[in-house]
Image (cartoon, rainbow, N blue to C red):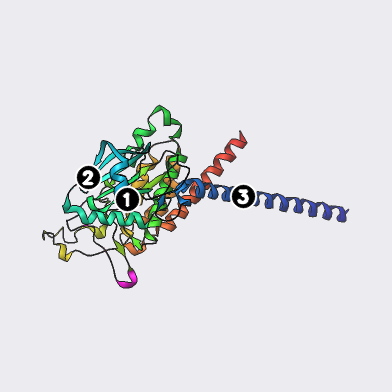
């Protein structure tokens, strides 16, 4: 009798072990699936990634083409209308061989250095997270990039309110955009061209304007005119401009340290800093991206601790973009898994 009982217990234990192993395996497979989905879809799986260096290929093109140079831009690219203007560039919707492209021209020679820096960064950082370079002409300060009709992140709420895109207005879409944003920061902080800081991000609106929304609802960084390098081993730090920065959006180390004493701002006395200024801004950008959709409160709950760390006044205590990205991916995976389990229960 004792022998039968022992055998039954052994079988039960074996069955439980098998069930636990199956559950663990299913969780692993789900995580790997979600991770691969993010790598293939979340990393903006653009076709130009397969082209050779200094070539481009837009969605409707069959073959990769060398970057357009002055002669081809002058004869084959036609301006259609002005669609944007900043201090550095005027941006036009243009057409090249039936393809819609963005044609950017220098607004003023006073900003030629910024324009050339942005172009050099576009050339050096080409990849799925950066807007695709189509061509450039140095003699008249012109560059051509892929056109994204949904525009910058500033348009997100307007786009998602449109009937055609309302089905996209979910926590999944919005959290994926937040992951894309942090992925871009991680890439810039570990780029082939060194550790780069997004200096054109002194307000939420200015930061959002640096990113374009693709047709498949992912992000590419577009404006790289102010992307200085940090090299901690060489003691190379940055200052984002030579004017006083104000507001809660910028990191504490970017603020004039003597503002409470009445001492006037002096750029010479202003301290320099590193890429952790970008980390400080992550919670504010993500707050905008998540919006007020169902599930948003749960996302903020899961991200509370990492966002608290992002807001550490001491930049050395803030996490890296990779640390933040891993938390974002974990939250996304767990929320998708919870949703799948909830549907299965129904």
Answer with the quarter of the image where residue 244 lies.
bottom left
Against 222, residue 318 (above or below) is below
Name the foreground residue: 135 vs 88: 135
Which range of residues does the magenta coloring cover? Answer: 232-247
Query: In which quarter of the view is residue 168 placed?
Result: top left
Task: Give the residue at mark 1.
Answer: 69
Regarding mark 2 in the picture, which secondary structure is present there?
loop
Characterize the magenta stretch by its predominant secondary structure.
loop
Q: Label 3: few (<14), some or many (≥20) within 10 Å?
A: few
Mark number for residue 49? none
Q: Earlier in the sequence, mark 3 or mark 1?
A: 3
**Disc 3/disc 2 C-alpha distance (Å):** 47 Å
Element class at badge 1: loop
- Regarding residue 207, the answer to whether it shows in the image is no
Q: Are marks 3 and 2 in contact (CB under 8 Å)?
A: no
For the view shown, which residue lies furthest in the right direction?
1
Write the residue at 48% across / 43% down.
Answer: 62
Q: Which one is closest to the eye, mark 3 or mark 2? A: 2
Number of marks in the image?
A: 3
Residue at the limit of the structure toward the bottom, as seen here: 234
x, y percentage for residue 135? 33, 49
- Per the rendering, the mark at residue 86 is 2
Of pointers 3 and 2, the one earlier in the residue sequence = 3
**Residue 20 visible at all:** yes
Reading the image, the residue beneath label 3 is: 29
């Amino acid at each position: 009798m004792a022998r039968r009982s022992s055998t039954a217990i052994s079988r039960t234990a074996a069955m439980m072990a098998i069930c636990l192993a199956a559950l663990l395996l299913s969780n692993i497979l789900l995580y790997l699936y979600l991770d691969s989905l993010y790598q293939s879809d979340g990393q903006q799986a653009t076709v130009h990634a397969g082209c050779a260096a200094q070539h481009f290929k837009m969605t409707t093109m069959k073959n990769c083409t060398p970057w357009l140079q002055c002669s081809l831009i002058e004869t084959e690219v036609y301006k259609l209308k002005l669609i944007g203007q900043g201090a550095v560039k005027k941006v036009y919707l243009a057409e090249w061989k039936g393809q819609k492209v963005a044609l950017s021209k220098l607004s003023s020679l006073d900003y030629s250095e910024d324009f050339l820096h942005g172009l050099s960064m576009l050339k050096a950082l080409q990849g799925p997270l950066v807007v695709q370079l189509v061509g450039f002409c140095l003699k008249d300060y012109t560059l051509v990039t892929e056109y994204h009709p949904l525009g910058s992140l500033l348009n997100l709420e307007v786009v998602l309110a449109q009937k055609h895109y309302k089905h996209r207005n979910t926590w999944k879409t919005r959290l994926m955009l937040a992951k894309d944003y942090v992925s871009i920061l991680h890439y810039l902080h570990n780029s082939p061209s060194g550790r780069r800081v997004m200096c054109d991000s002194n307000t939420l609106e200015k930061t959002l304007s640096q990113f374009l929304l693709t047709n498949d609802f992912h992000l590419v960084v577009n404006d790289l005119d102010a992307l200085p390098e940090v090299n901690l081993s060489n003691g190379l730090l940055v200052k984002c401009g030579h004017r006083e920065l104000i507001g809660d959006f910028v990191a504490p180390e970017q603020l004039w340290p003597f503002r409470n004493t009445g001492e006037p701002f002096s750029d010479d006395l202003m301290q320099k800093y590193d890429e952790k200024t970008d980390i400080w801004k992550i919670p504010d950008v993500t707050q905008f991206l998540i919006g007020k959709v169902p599930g948003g409160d749960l996302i903020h709950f899961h991200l509370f601790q990492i966002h608290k760390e992002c807001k550490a006044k001491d930049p050395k205590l803030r996490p890296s973009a990779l640390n933040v990205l891993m938390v974002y991916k974990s939250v996304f995976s767990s929320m998708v898994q919870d949703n799948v389990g909830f549907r299965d229960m129904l």
